[in-house]
Image (tube, grey):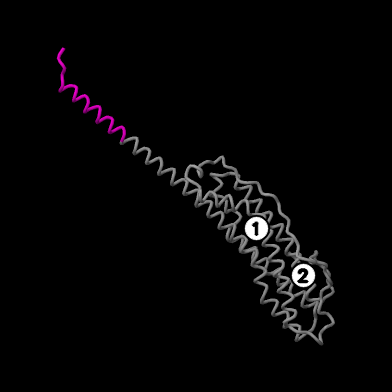
């Protein structure tokens, strides 16, 4: 039997060409698949980053009340120089604090922060409930802190009743600023405790490999409701009658 060298070499070349083409096709498919996975993972990371940024923005807005109130404290302290009426001063502080609070709530609604989890929800459905749990916890802490803040400002202002002769504007201003500082720190701590697990989860997504990021079965940590601790001597507002004789609590 004679060996047909020409035929065999041709077959080998054909086989080699097919193998090269198949290899190129597999490599192209793998690269395309890897690119799609990277793009999807990057999309998830961006969603996590946006959710984290919006959560931090929520904290920034709700804490702004205590700083926004600083000019009010100066104004009220100076008002007593012209007319020494501590009850009227208390009424003005409560009225303006409620106004500032409502303005901040409108800002929160306008920025649609409560729906910040939407982009991430497609990949991690549990993010919705956990994000809402965090927001609910912040609201509970905010309500408690605000009521404590009202009580603290009332205590500070009414402590100057009957002391007109020795009154100094700086003393009242300092008392009000100390009250704001105490409650801001208390509220800030409550927010950090409430959101820390969710923040840690979102940050971990941003630093994971593509494969880890695409594992949808990874659970978002459950969030426990944290209480808002109180500064020393804090208590619920005990409303004294206002300058018109009305003892109704301030509108919230």
**Residue sitting nearer the eye, 230 or 116:** 230
Q: At which x and y percent is residue 164?
A: 81, 85
> Magenta: predominant secondary structure element?
helix
**Residue sitting nearer the eye, 209 or 24:** 209
**Residue sitting nearer the eye, 42 or 120:** 42
The residue located at (68%, 57%) in the rendering is 138
User: Crowding near pointer 1: few (<14 within 10 Å), some, many (20+)?
Assistant: some
Rendering quarter of residue 37: top left
Q: At which x and y percent is residue 42?
A: 46, 49
User: Crowding near pointer 2: few (<14 within 10 Å), some, many (20+)?
Assistant: many
Can you name the residue that lies furthest to the top here? 1
In front: mark 1 or mark 2? 1
Which residue range is magenta in the image? 1-23
- Which label belongs to residue 192? 1
The residue located at (80%, 64%) in the rendering is 235
Residue at numbered disc 2: 152
Provide the secondary structure element on which disc 2 rests. helix
Rendering quarter of residue 91: bottom right
Confirm or deny contact between disc 1 and disc 2 (CB under 8 A).
no
Q: Is residue 19 left or right of residue 106?
A: left
Determine if the magenta segment contains residue 158. Answer: no
Q: Where is the C terminus found, in terms of image quarters?
A: bottom right
Q: Is residue 227 left or right of residue 130?
A: right
């Amino acid at each position: 039997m004679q060996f047909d060298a020409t035929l065999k070499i041709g077959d080998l070349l054909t086989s080699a060409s097919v193998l090269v083409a198949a290899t190129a096709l597999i490599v192209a498919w793998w690269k395309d698949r890897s690119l799609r996975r990277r793009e999807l993972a990057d999309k998830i990371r961006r969603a996590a980053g946006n959710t984290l940024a919006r959560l931090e923005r929520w904290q920034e807005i709700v804490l702004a009340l205590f700083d926004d109130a600083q000019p009010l404290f100066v104004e009220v302290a100076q008002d007593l120089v012209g007319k020494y009426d501590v009850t009227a001063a208390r009424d003005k502080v409560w009225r303006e604090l409620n106004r500032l609070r409502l303005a901040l709530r409108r800002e929160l609604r306008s920025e649609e922060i409560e729906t910040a989890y939407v982009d991430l929800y497609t990949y991690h459905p549990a993010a919705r409930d956990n994000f809402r749990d965090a927001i609910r916890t912040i609201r509970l802490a905010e309500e408690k802190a605000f009521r404590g803040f009202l009580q603290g400002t009332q205590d500070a202002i009414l402590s100057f009743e009957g002391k007109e002769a020795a009154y100094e504007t700086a003393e009242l201003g300092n008392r009000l600023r100390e009250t704001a500082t105490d409650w801001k720190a208390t509220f800030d701590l409550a927010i950090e405790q409430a959101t820390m697990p969710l923040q840690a989860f979102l940050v971990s997504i941003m630093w994971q490999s593509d494969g880890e990021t695409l594992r949808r079965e990874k659970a978002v940590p459950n969030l426990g409701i944290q209480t808002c601790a109180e500064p020393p001597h804090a208590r619920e507002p005990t409303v004294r009658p206002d300058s018109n004789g009305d003892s109704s609590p301030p509108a919230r």
